[in-house]
Image (cartoon, rainbow, N blue to C red):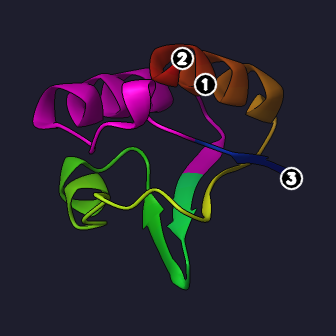
Amino acid sequence: MIRKPIIFPGHAPLTRALAAEVVQTASAYEARVMIQREQKIVNAKSMLGLLSLGADDQANMMLVAEGVDEAEAVAAVMAVLA
């Protein structure tokens, strides 16, 4: 399992366009890819899940991946968020 803190580009809130790009990228991998914000954990392969985070405040957000290609999935999602 890999856990990495994340911050959206320019510290801006999560937009629909960025969420769609994260979903598309995460969906290309077999690993389970999740985003955790405080006690809430959502599937990064779910547009509705990402948008439900209400990620205006990005404090304590983590990207969590678990599976055979977890390292590649984390690298790809982090590249989208860079």
Which numbered disc flags the more N-terminal residue, 3 or 2?
A: 3
The verdict on residue 19 being magenta is yes
Marks 2 and 1: in contact by CB < 8 Å?
Answer: yes
**Eye-nearest disc, 3 or 1:** 1
Q: In the rendered structure, which amino acid carries the disc numbered 2?
A: Ala
Mark 1 burial class by Cα count in 10 Å: few <14, some 14-19, many 20+: some
Q: Position of residue 42 (x, y in %)?
A: 43, 65
Q: Which residue is mark 1?
A: 78
Q: Position of residue 43 (x, y in %)?
A: 43, 57
State the extent of the magenta-drawn residues as a range.
7-33
Q: Horizontal placement of 26 versus 30: left or right? A: left
Question: What distance separates the C-alpha of mark 1 from that of mark 2?
Answer: 6 Å
For disc 3, the marked residue is 1
Residue drawn at 76 percent across, 35 percent down: 70
**Amino acid at dot 3:** Met
Secondary structure found at label 3? loop
